[in-house]
Amino acid sequence: MEQTPGPAGPPLTPRTAVVWSVLRAELDRRPAAELTVLDVGGGTGGFAVPLARAGHRVTVVDASPDALAALSRRAAEAGVAGRVRAVQGDADALAGLIEPASVDLVLCHAVLEVVDDPAPVVSALVGVLRPGGAASVLVAGRAAAVLGRAMNGHLDVAATLAADPTGAAGARDTLRRRFDVESAAALLAAAGLTVEEIHGVRVLADLLPAAVADGQAAALVELERTLAAQPPWRDVAAQLHLFARRPA
Ligand SMILES: C[S@@+](CC[C@H](N)C(=O)[O-])C[C@H]1O[C@@H](n2cnc3c(N)ncnc32)[C@H](O)[C@@H]1O
C-alpha cells in the first residue's frame, strides 16, 4: 500500500498539506485496511484519486457531471478506476445514495458553504458513517474573507461579512455562508459528531505576493503547518478544517 501522500502522492501545497497530515494520521491507525471512503462534493478527485492509489475504495458524490467526468479520467490515468466510483447526486440527498453506516471516512471539503442548508447535509454525513468512522470537513473561514475584502479596499463588503450572521455578503457573494471555528464546531457537534481537531488551511498563502508564495513554496508549506493548529493564526485562515468522529 502506498503512503498517502508521499513521493508518489500529490504534491503538498498550502491548500492540501495540513489536510493530508490529518488524513494520513487517520489512515495510519489502520495501515493494512482497505477503507471505504466517501467524498461528498469531491469534484475532480484531488483527494479521491490519491486515496484510491493508497489502496482505499472511494465513492465521490458530486452534483456536477463535468467534474465527475474529469474524476473518471483522472482515476483511469492513475490506474485506479476500479477503486473509484463516481455518483452524480446532491449532497442534500446523500441518505438516498449511500448505504447507512457503511463508510469509514467521509470527506466534505468546500461544500457546506454552498449547499442550501448545511445542517441536514452534516446529519447525512453522520448517517452514512460507521460508528467510530471519521469526518474530514473543510469550510470557508469568515475572518479571512473580512480581512481579504478590507485589504482590497472593499470596506463595505468587509463590514457586511463581519456583521452578517451567516458570514455572507449578499446576493452577489459566491458563497452562501462562511464559518468561524465556533460555528463550524457547533454545526458538527449538533449532528452528533465529536470534533477531535481543528486546523486553519491557508493561514498565509492567500495574503502573500505570488512571487513569495512561489519562490519559497517549501518554506510556506512548513510555516502553514506550524501555524495551522495555533490560535489566533488558525482562526484567520481562508479555510477551517475540522476532523470529527461518529461516536463508536
Ligand atoms: C469548491 S468545489 C470543491 C471540490 C473538492 N471537494 C475540493 O475541495 O477540491 C465544490 C464541489 O462541490 C460540488 N457541489 C456543489 N454543491 C453540491 C451539492 N449540493 N451536492 C453535491 N455536490 C455539490 C461542486 O460540483 C464541486 O465539485
Image: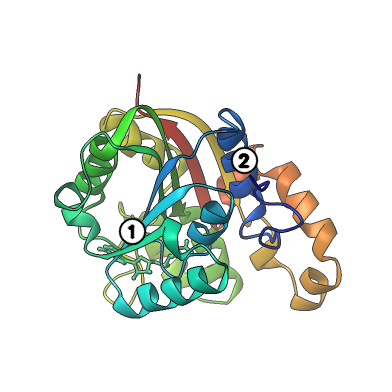
Instruction: Identify which residue, 62 or 117, lies in the foreground.
Output: 62
Left or right of residue 169, residue 75 in this image: right
How crowded is the residue under tag 1: few (<14 C-alpha within 10 Å), some, or many (20+)?
A: many
| Whole-percent x, y for residue 14 in the image | 68, 59
Q: Residue 52: x, y in percent?
A: 51, 54
For residue 18, side relative to residue 137 (left or right): right
**Residue 110 makes an appearance in the image:** no
Asked whether the residues under the numbered discs 2 and 1 touch, taking CB atoms below 8 Å apart as contact, a structural biologist would say no
Quadrant position of the C terminus in the picture:
top left
Q: Disc 2 versus disc 1: distance between alpha carbons?
A: 29 Å
Q: What residue is at 41 percent from the left and 68 percent from the top?
A: 43
Residue 115 is situated, as x and y percent measured from the top left of the image, at: 26, 60
Q: Earlier in the sequence, mark 2 or mark 1?
A: 2
Mark 1 highlights which residue?
Answer: 177
In the rendered image, residue 122, in percent from the top left (x then y), is placed at 28, 43
| Image point (58%, 51%), residue name | 236
Q: Which residue is mark 2?
A: 24
Can residue 111 be seen by looking at this rendering?
Answer: yes
Find numbered disc 1 in the image and state the secondary structure of the residue it sits on: loop
Question: What amino acid type is highlighted by mark number 2?
Answer: Arg
Location of the N terminus (image quadrant): top right
